[in-house]
Amino acid sequence: MTTEYWIGALGVAATLLGVIVTWRVARYSQTRRELTYKVTMEPILRSPIPALEATDLRISYKGEELPEPVLLSVDVTNTGNAVIENPPIEIRAPGATYVIPGYFESPPPGYETIWMFERNDGESCAIRLPHINPGQTAKARMLMDEMPGQLPQFICPMAGVFVRRQMSIKVNKFVQFIVDIISPQLGGAIRSLTE
């Protein structure tokens, strides 16, 4: 291999590296306001308890009986690169299923008193987040009185904010390690998808 070949190969490599660096700088200099959400439902009692008759166990909330209580988990992640203030998030159950405010699982320190719920009516509940930082996840937990036929709706009509449903993925630990080194923000977003 001649010297000209190596000089040419180094020139191509330097050009490619320059293109990658320019692309990354341009991508992260633009403000992206994006919320990603994941909704899951799980019955609290998976099957009837053999030792108890159906009339022996009753679960209620403020006088409302929950015939088939269901845990509704809604994880909202800011996958953009800018703080999002006061996103108008509403969870609406299909049909006549009641949604009951619950709690936030493992909120960041200081957020225990500012992240909250507001019950709009029996079938919907608002999640109030005065702000959510990039990479932050609000893990909202609510109850429903029965298992609906379809997932509750996640509604966030906020101008300038892209909202998308999060799908779970599997990532090799070595790949996660490499991505964390190259781009910690991307690594955090991937980690939130694998939880």
Image (tube, rainbow, N blue to C red):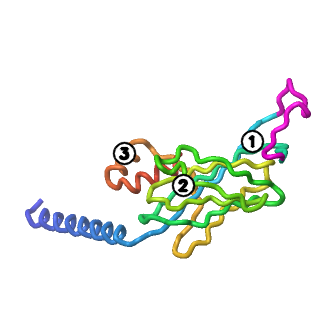
Residue 43: image tag: 1
Magenta-colored segment: predominant secondary structure: loop
The answer to whether 130 appears left or right of 25 in the picture is: right
Q: CA distance from mark 3 to mark 1?
A: 35 Å
Residue lying at the far bottom in this picture: please name it: 159
Q: Quarter of the image holding residue 65?
A: top right
Q: Please report whichever mark, 3 or 2, sits nearer to the chain's N-terminal start.
A: 2
Circle 3 sits on which residue?
177
User: Who comes first in sequence, dot 3 or dot 1?
Assistant: 1
Q: Residue most toward the top?
A: 51
Residue drawn where x is 13% and y is 62% of the image: 6
Q: CA distance from mark 2 to mark 1?
A: 28 Å
At label 3, the amino acid type is Phe
* Amino acid type at mark 1: Pro
Which three-letter amino acid code belongs to the residue tagged 2?
A: Ile
Residue at left 57%, top 50%?
139
Residue at numbered disc 2: 114
Give x and y (percent) for residue 79: 47, 60
How many labels, in total? 3
State left or right for residue 34 relative to residue 143: left
